[in-house]
Image (cartoon, grey):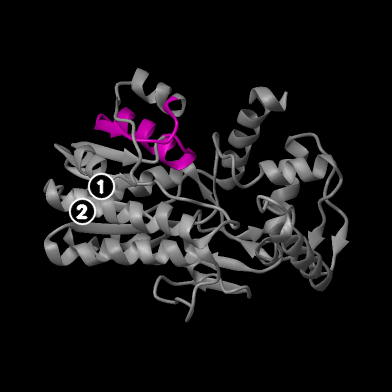
Amino acid sequence: MRILVTGASGFIGGRFARFALEQGLEVRVNGRRAEGVEHLVKRGAQFIPGDLGDAELARRLCQGVDAVVHCAGMTGAWGRYQDFHQGNVVVTENVVEGCLKEHVRRLVHLSSPSIYFNGRSRLNVQEQQLPRRMHDHYATTKFLAEQKVFGAQEFGLEVLALRPRLVTGAGDANIFPRLLQMQRKRRLAIIGNGLNMADFTSVHNLNEALLSALFADDEALGQAYNISNGQPLPLWDVVNYVMRQMQLPQVTRYRSYGLGYSLAALNEAACMLWPGRPQPTLSRLGMQVMSKDFTLDISRARQHLDYRPQVSLWSALDEFCGWWKNVPHNR
């Protein structure tokens, strides 16, 4: 099988492209940073640079491939709606059109469980349990992108969407680095009672799920799938495990949710007025994510993708910490 992996200069796309090469697949990659895919090219991947916002480039990327794993997109909790729309919706539209015009058989789309989040605690969320409205720009545009993908079914494209929760392992520059930086400055505090449950996903387990999606049979098509390790844990226990592994003090200071939320609102307001609108160090969404229960039901993935998480969260965290210690700017 010959596949295209978009977003391959990022964490998830890059790790899956490497895994796919190890499984013997022919892999074409696209990403924003050429230096981020050098290791893939050395392993035999074909790299075609360019911006997926260009519809013609997206079409050229899709020429001659059997399937596309679409990991590219804009992430984060801060920014303008139009930027999120361009990075998630328009880019996905272009990939879908490229697949249809070049007669690609299957598209596996990397979505996000952020579309479920409503600022309150939610446990064992199933794929159909969507809120009436999305909570932020990121969630809104990831949901719209999903709809573009599923809409292509009527034109004959085989589609699946995966919604992995808090993916970590070597290469993860999103979840823990900012928390580590804050704790080094003694600015990190437990929000609320510190008992809120969260799901995480080893990148190895996500790789297996993505591979399964590429080869899944017809009854698995046309659906979204929650992906996690399937073993929720208190979020702050996980954070403090990482602190211990990185030889930093445990997070023991508590801050009430109300105070944290108010400070975050003030911080956001100040950043909105500041030239360039810099990203706030505290955000209301961050306060909610760090204090609310948020876990997923992965039974659909178990049933239709034969998804069986094999790598524990602790192994994934050890892998992350070993990698992060050796990132040059962190030495």
Magenta residue check for 28: yes
Q: Nearer the viewer, residue 149 or 34?
A: 34
Magenta stretch in the rendered image? 9-34
Q: Position of residue 268 (x, y in %)?
A: 72, 62
> Mark 1 falls on what kind of element?
helix
Compared to 306, does 19 lie above or below?
A: above
* Left or right of 321 on screen, residue 51: left
Q: Is residue 177 visible?
A: yes
Q: Position of residue 252 (x, y in %)?
A: 86, 54
Q: Position of residue 128 (x, y in %)?
A: 39, 75
Q: Which residue is mark 2?
A: 97
Q: Judge depth for marks 1 and 2 and give the one in front.
A: 1
Name the residue: 57% across, 74% down: 118
Magenta residue check for 25: yes
Q: Amino acid at mark 1?
A: Ala
> Disc 1 and disc 2: Cα gap in Å?
8 Å
Compared to 65, does 155 lie above or below?
A: below
Quadrant where the N terminus is found in the figure: top left
Label ID, residue 282: none
Q: Amino acid at mark 2?
A: Glu
Q: Nearer the viewer, residue 7 or 170?
A: 7
Q: Nearer the viewer, residue 231 or 38?
A: 38
* Left or right of 17 on screen, residue 287: right
Q: Of label 1 and label 2, which has the lower sequence position?
A: 1
Circle 1/circle 2 CB separation < 8 Å:
yes
Q: Which residue is mark 1?
A: 55
Name the residue: 16% across, 57% down: 157
